[in-house]
C-alpha cells in the first residue's frame, strides 16, 4: 500500500502553484522616452472627445459617450448611470412617458445636452436643496460636458 506524498516531502519545484504566498510589489512607474525632461501624456478626455459636440448629440451617442467616460475613469458609476439613462431609448416609451407627454421617442434627434444638464442641475437645486448627492453628480456631469471642445 502506497501513501500519498505530503507537502513537506514534495520538493518546492513540484509543489502545486497557487498555494504559495505571493508578496505584493507595487507596479513600477512608466518610463518616458528619452529626449526631454518632461513626459507628455494625452488626457483620456481629449482622446474620447475628439469629434463630439455636447450641444448636438443624440441620446444613442450620449449613452456611448457615458460608457467611454466611465471606463476611462472620468465619471463615477453613479454619474455614468445618470448620464446614460436616456428615456427615448426605453422600449416602452410610447406607453409611459409618451402617453403622458404626447410625444414620440426620438433617439436619433440631436439635442443640446449641456442645456439638458443645466436644467437638471437647476431642478435639483430648487426642488431637492437638502440632497447634495444628486446636485453634485449633475454638477460634475455638466462640468465634463462643458469641457468638450466646440461646446
Image (cartoon, rainbow, N blue to C red):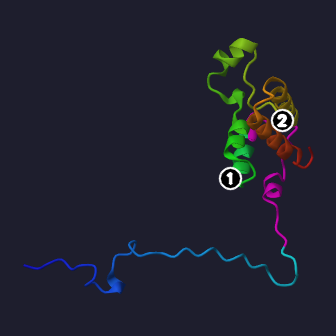
Image-quadrant location for residue 2? bottom left
The percent coordinates of residue 73 (x first, y second) are 72, 54
Q: Residue 30 carries which label?
A: none
Q: Give the range drawn in magenta.
A: 40-62
Mark count? 2
| Magenta portion: prevailing SS class | loop
Tag 1 residue: 71
Q: Give the vertical position of 6 relative to 67 (above or below).
A: below
Q: Which residue is painted at 82% across and 61% down in the image?
A: 43
Q: Give the vertical position of 102 relative to 89 (above or below).
A: above
Q: Residue 113 carries which label?
A: 2
* Residue positioned most to the right: 150
The percent coordinates of residue 144 (x first, y second) are 83, 46
Counting other residues with Cα less than 10 Å from the Cα at mark 1, is it few (<14), some (14-19), or many (20 or more)?
few
Q: Upstream in the sequence, badge 2 or badge 1? A: 1
Q: Which residue is painted at 33% across and 80% down in the image?
A: 15
Amino acid at each position: 500500500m502506497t501513501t500519498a506524498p505530503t507537502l513537506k516531502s514534495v520538493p518546492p519545484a513540484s509543489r502545486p502553484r497557487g498555494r504559495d504566498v505571493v508578496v505584493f510589489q507595487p507596479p513600477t512607474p512608466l518610463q518616458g522616452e528619452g529626449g526631454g525632461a518632461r513626459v507628455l501624456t494625452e488626457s483620456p478626455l481629449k482622446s474620447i472627445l475628439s469629434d463630439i459636440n455636447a450641444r448636438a448629440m443624440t441620446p444613442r451617442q450620449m449613452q456611448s459617450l457615458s460608457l467611454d467616460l466611465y471606463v476611462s475613469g472620468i465619471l463615477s458609476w453613479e454619474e455614468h448611470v445618470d448620464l446614460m439613462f436616456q428615456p427615448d431609448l426605453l422600449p416602452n416609451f410610447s406607453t409611459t412617458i409618451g402617453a403622458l407627454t404626447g410625444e414620440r421617442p426620438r433617439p436619433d434627434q440631436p439635442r443640446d445636452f449641456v442645456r439638458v444638464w443645466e436644467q437638471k442641475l437647476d431642478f435639483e437645486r430648487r426642488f431637492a436643496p437638502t440632497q447634495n448627492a444628486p446636485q453634485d453628480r449633475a454638477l460634475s456631469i455638466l462640468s465634463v460636458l462643458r469641457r468638450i471642445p466646440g461646446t
